[in-house]
Image (cartoon, rainbow, N blue to C red):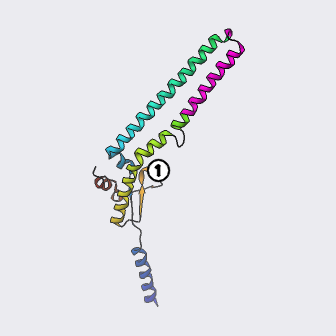
Amino acid sequence: MKKLLLITLICILYSTVSYAQKFGYVDTDKILNKMSEYTDAQTKIDNIAKQWQEEIARKYKEIDDLYREYQAQQILLSEDMKLKREEEITDKEKAVKELQKQRFGQGGDLFKKREELIKPIQEKVFNAINKMAQTKGLDFVFDKSSGTTVLYSDAKFDFSNEIIKTLGY
């Protein structure tokens, strides 16, 4: 009876060990920062954002100048002229706010540009990770850079450098 229990216990332990899941992790920030096309794309996005921000700042300054001019001339203007100027200023403010939303809002031009330039690079990295995971027989690959709950990681499970080499960087 003891022998049967021991054999059963050994079989259970052996089966759990043989079905152990393999995992690894990568640091996508580290990988992306090694890729020149990513840094180039990020620079382009930053430059575009800066240009758009400067454009919006210029428009706000124009509105501010119009408002100051209106305040200075307000005493001399008729009620009709006052309303016309106030409406003009309000319309310009609405237009600038709409432009700002169009450029920087959710789903705006900056989001689309980032998706256009960065997404193909991310897909390239994702495909390399998938290929490496299949080659190594990994069940899970975690991204250390995305703030997931990886509380401890042994460096022997970090495959970031292998992905960088696979991508040719």
Predominant SS along the magenta part: helix
| x, y percent for residue 132 | 34, 61
86 part of magenta stretch: yes
Residue 142 lies left or right of residue 64; in this view the side is left
- The residue at the point 35 percent across, 41 percent down is 39
| Amino acid on which the number 1 mark rests in the picture | Gly
Rendered position, 99 above or below 29: above
- The residue at the point 39 percent across, 40 percent down is 42
**Residue 157 makes an appearance in the image:** yes
| x, y percent for residue 133 | 36, 62
Q: Residue furthest right?
A: 79
Rendered position, 88 above or below 37: above
| x, y percent for residue 29 | 39, 47
| x, y percent for residue 126 | 39, 55
Residue 85 lies left or right of residue 2; in this view the side is right
| Most foreground residue, 106 or 88 | 88
| Most foreground residue, 27 or 107 | 107
84 part of magenta stretch: yes
**Residue 154 makes an appearance in the image:** no
Per the rendered image, the range of residues in magenta is 75-99
Q: Specify the quadrant of the image occupied by residue 17.
A: bottom left
| Most foreground residue, 139 or 123 | 123
Query: Residue under circle 1?
Result: 147
Q: Residue furthest bottom?
A: 1
Secondary-structure class at tag 1: loop
Q: Residue furthest top?
A: 76
Q: Specify the quadrant of the image occupied by residue 156.
A: bottom left
- The residue at the point 62 percent across, 26 percent down is 91
